[in-house]
Image (spheres, grey):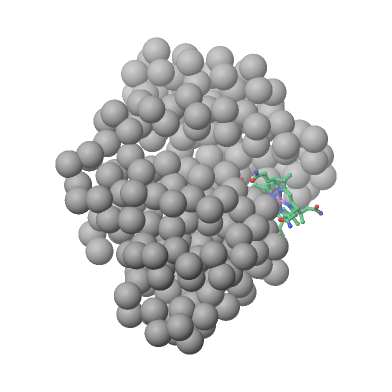
Amino acid sequence: MANENEKKALHDAMVAYKVPGIQAAVEAARKAGMTPNEIIDALGDGMTEVGVLFERGKLFLPHVLSAAAGMKGALEVLEPEMCAAGDVSAKKESAVMGTVEGDVHDIGKSICSTMLQCAGFDVHDLGRDVPNAQFIEKVKAGCKFCGMSALMTTTMVVQKDVIELLKKEGLRDKVVVMVGGAPVTQAYADKIGADIFGETASETTRKVKEF
Ligand code: B12
């Protein structure tokens, strides 16, 4: 199948967690004609594998940090190209994105932010460990979409807290709430009353555009 070798090389370079190796695999994939989205998806698969190996004690924190740095570097390189290929004619709706309070995992959230931006959205990315009140302020300021990422079972509950806060402020009907992150499921999104659950950045962008 097309680009299967490059996909495997991207995945393997992430698992090998060395930044120069990741850069070289990205370069080779671009030369082979893979799109930025395809490259990011393959790197994301590799990052997930890094997580599994970390959980099994086969990789340690410095390795995870190095893989994360490689992923971020790749995102920076690919972002301009992604945006050039994106649907810039789309109406510019604004979206606030952030990783919830108490959680510093921001790789997946940043991928989603970048893809939304490239799809023509005006994205206000608040970063990670974002205090609940900052999401509310952005909705008050006019953001029509509010995206919250949580990577830990201990922080996914914060997504619910922000939704409750939106209700308390009378803002819930004015905003489309999106939730995501590895432990979050469609069932959980339904339970806390979110509008959109995104398992991947591509799926998130598709659902947001449909909304
Ligand atoms: C990389 C990583 C780190 C890096 C983070 C670097 C960074 N800048 O993000 C570092 C090393 C800093 C780190 C730290 C910690 N980590 Co960590 N980490 C991971 C790891 C290995 C990978 C996460 C990742 O980047 N995945 C790849 C991305 C591409 O996938 P993703 O985030 O799921 O995103 C996709 C989708 O979910 C979706 N999506 C994501 N966000 C959003 C948002 C919206 C709105 C939507 C719609 C969709 C969406 O789209 C994305 C792209 O397709 C996971 C393992 C795992 N299985 O997830 C553990 C993991 C999440 N970490 C864990 C833990 C415990 C920690 C620490 C507490 C460790 C410690 N003892 O210090 C600290 C956290 C401190 C804190 N307060 O947050 C646990 C959490 C367990 C739990 N309770 O649930 C995990 C599961 C590992 C484990 N089993 O132990 N970690």
**Is 67 situated left or right of 123 in this image?**
right
Q: Residue at x 65, y 36 (%)?
A: 68
| Residue 94, percent from left and from top | 33, 56
| Frontmost residue, 93 versus 54 | 93
Q: Among all residues in the image, which is located at the extreme front? A: 141
**Residue 197 visible in image:** no
**Is 205 situated left or right of 161 in this image?**
left
Q: Is residue 166 above or below residue 141?
A: below
| Frontmost residue, 82 versus 63 | 82
Q: Residue at x 23, y 59 (%)?
A: 210
Q: What quarter of the picture does the N terminus occupy?
A: top left
Q: Is residue 115 above or below residue 85?
A: below
Q: What is the number of callouts on the image?
A: 0
| Residue 200, percent from left and from top | 44, 51
| Frontmost residue, 173 versus 204 | 173
Quarter holding residue 49: top right
| Residue 122, percent from left and from top | 34, 49
Q: What quarter of the picture does the C terminus occupy?
A: bottom left
Q: Residue at x 72, y 37 (%)?
A: 65
Q: Residue at x 44, y 51 (%)?
A: 124
Quarter holding residue 193: bottom left
Q: Among all residues in the image, which is located at the extreme left? A: 89
**Residue 208 visible in image:** yes
